[in-house]
Amino acid sequence: MRNTGENRENDWIGDLTSGRCTEDVFRTLFESSGDGMMLIHPLKGFIRGNAAILRLFRCATEAEFLTRSPADLSPDNQPDGAWSSAKSHDMMRIALDTGYHAFDWLHCRTDGTTFPAFVTLSRIELRGKRFLFATVREITEQKRAEVLWKTNEYLESLFECANAPIIVWDSHSVITRVNRVCEEITGRPAAEIVGKPLDSLIPESVLARTKELIYGVRVPARNGNPWRSI
């Protein structure tokens, strides 16, 4: 026989999954979610927006948000050159036809600043009518990381494919990387070069002049008299 605690828990779960309570649960999730959420009527536009979406677009109230359209909260053109007004309708039509659509989008806040976002559109039915439930998540940091990754990949390719020697050193003039051409010219593998002072790759006869050219500062010559800075 189940104990009273179990019975109460089961009763509570039963209440939670009942029709009215389920609506309350989803309303709570909608309002408290950290992701921007909104309900869209295919013809009338926005009809609900949660607190996170108001913060994201910098709207003071939900009433202010509901006066906007998807095109109002987007720049004139998307990064691919398409008109936002036309493309937003295309995105909604796909979601209505297939039931779900996810895509990257460039949005615009009410103050005019733009930001990249990941948007999902899900078709739902309420009281026999079709709506779109949308989530909007800002992905500015992810986009920056993508740009940085592509830049690093490009620089890495240049580093490895360059037909001239490349040496990288830190603020203490300790060598941290060399490319293949540098290994070939010096006749030394990278393992023997990395970790050594930069001076170790510069002939003594041109050391002072080379430092002057690299650092642009006065460097004491062998006789103790400084070179003139350039």
Image (cartoon, rainbow, N blue to C red):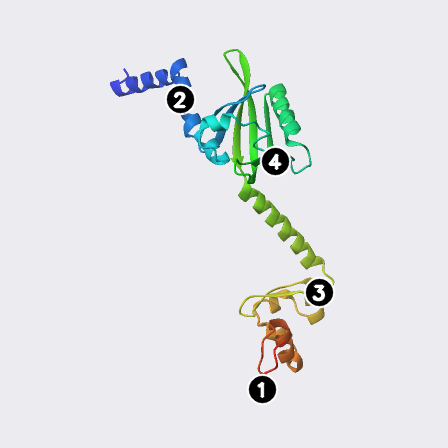
Labelled disc at residue 26: none
- Residue at horizontal 61 percent and vertical 75 percent from the top: 200
| 128 to 143, vertically: above or below | above
Between the residue at mark 2 and the residue at mark 1, the CA separation in whole angstroms equals 81 Å
Q: Which residue is mark 3?
A: 181
Look at the numbered disc 1 and give the secondary structure of its residue: loop
Between the residue at mark 3 and the residue at mark 4, the CA separation in whole angstroms equals 47 Å
- Residue at horizontal 69 percent and vertical 66 percent from the top: 165
Between residues 221 and 218, which one lies in front from this camera angle?
218
Closer to the chain start, of discs 2 and 3, is: 2
At label 4, the amino acid type is Pro
Q: Which residue is mark 1?
A: 225
Between the residue at mark 3 and the residue at mark 1, the CA separation in whole angstroms equals 35 Å
Identify the image quadrant of the N terminus: top left
Labelled disc at residue 75: 4
Circles 4, 1 touching at the beta carbon (< 8 Å):
no
| 178 to 208, vertically: above or below | above
Is residue 34 rendered to the left or right of residue 109?
A: left
Between the residue at mark 2 and the residue at mark 3, the CA separation in whole angstroms equals 65 Å
Labelled disc at residue 25: 2
Identify the image quadrant of the C terminus: bottom right
Residue lying at the far right of the rendered structure: 163
Between residues 78 and 72, which one lies in front from this camera angle?
72
At label 3, the amino acid type is Val
Specify few, some or many for label 1: CA neighbours under 10 Å numbering under 14, 14-19, or 20 or more: few
Specify few, some or many for label 3: CA neighbours under 10 Å numbering under 14, 14-19, or 20 or more: some
At label 2, the amino acid type is Val
Circles 2, 3 touching at the beta carbon (< 8 Å):
no
Viewer-nearest of discs 3 and 4: 4
